[in-house]
Amino acid sequence: MHELAVTESVLKIAIEHAEQAGAERITAVTLVIGDMSSFVDDSIQFYFDLLTPGTLAEGAQLHFKRIAIQFRCRSCEEEFEPRGMDWTCPKCCALGGTVIAGKEFYIESIVVKSEE
Amino acid sequence: MCDPCGCEDHVHKHEHPHETETGAWKIPVVQKILSANDQAALENREHLAAHNITTINIMSSPGAGKTTLLMATIAALEGTVRVGVIEGDVASQVDAERIATTGAPVVQINTGGGCHLDAPMVHRALHALPLAEIDPLFIENVGNLICPVAFDLGQRYKVALLSVPEGHDKPYKYPAIFEAVDLVVVTKSDLMPYLDFDLDAFRKLMQSLNPKAPVLFLSAQTGEGMADWLGWIVENV
């Protein structure tokens, strides 16, 4: 449900950066989204397609880089991905760990164009 | 998988950002998408600090007992601290009306379909509260284990409630909220004899995900465990 407001933010930030750079069009936007954040690619894509016509980003491609959840074991420092309901460290079998990746939610870059 | 750019699988076809095209160039942005909310949250935090108000953002599934716990809390703390409440719901004034019966100042926010509170909503609600007379302020978020955690409100503490009927395995399914909070309160402890909630397994899971967050266990209905919760509030206000 909250992807509409979130996609509006994406568009606003992208347009601000494009305008600052003196660009006339945005051709691509790359988002980085951690699997622990609550944002859904298809839903962002849906609102992006709805919001962009008539803006600098009309027709722009939206790219998603998903980042898997990554734990760092508190016992042996091993870094590993939890597998569903199996959170045991593959090296020392301790449970869980400090979350070191998976919470990302940012615009990495945009590709812009000038018409000349 | 398109190896050259290192991006993930895409169902749709796309241009590669690094492909050189006349007049096209790449701009690194690296800006948090929720930065506008974060900024508003920062302003709320400063505003609340200026009024010496400790703010506690309470998050849980719908029906975990947030309002019931708040009502029992307000009654128990009467005469010691002056509690204020912001109630967040998709629709209705039901919860604010319940809180109002305790005499505590309360403001209802209706998100109109929105699945969480955000910082600008809380900012507007703060204008409707007698800030000089309140400490602590509880914000009861929209019942939802997923979305509220992504939106900073400017609170000092984040608390997750989990009711016994929901089951002890919730951190596996909703790690983001249980990883982010400062305290977890397991509610409806009086239902333990009837359900197979494994408290030891839950504590172990919380210890593995978020060892800094204490886990309390209580029933607002019977009063069991309420002293620990009230103690936590008084200690942190």
Image (tube, rainbow, N blue to C red):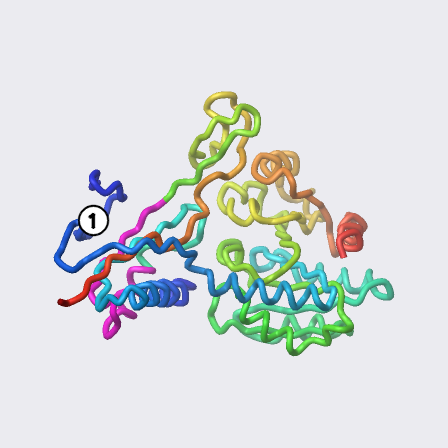
Residue located beneath label 1 in the image: B18
Indicate the position of residue B72 as horizontal and vertical percent values: 76, 61
Q: Find numbered disc 1 in the image and state the secondary structure of the residue it sits on.
A: loop
B13 vs B103, left or right, is left
Q: Is B115 located above or below residue A65 in the figure? A: below
Indicate the position of residue B151 as horizontal and vertical percent values: 52, 59
- The magenta-colored residue range is A44-66
Q: Is B193 located above or below residue A60 in the figure? A: above
- Residue in front for this viewpoint, A9 or B106: A9
Q: Is A94 located above or below residue B2 in the figure? A: above
Residue at image x 68%, y 51%?
B188
- The verdict on residue A65 being magenta is yes
Kindly identify which chain the residue marked by label 1 belongs to: B
B35 vs B215, left or right, is left
A19 vs B224, left or right, is left
Indicate the position of residue B213 as horizontal and vertical percent values: 65, 43
- Residue in front for this viewpoint, A37 or A13: A13
Q: Quadrant of residue B125?
A: bottom right
**Where the C terminus of chain B falls, by quadrant?**
bottom right
Residue at image x 35%, y 46%?
A66
Three-letter residue code for mark 1: His
Q: Quadrant of residue B153?
A: bottom right
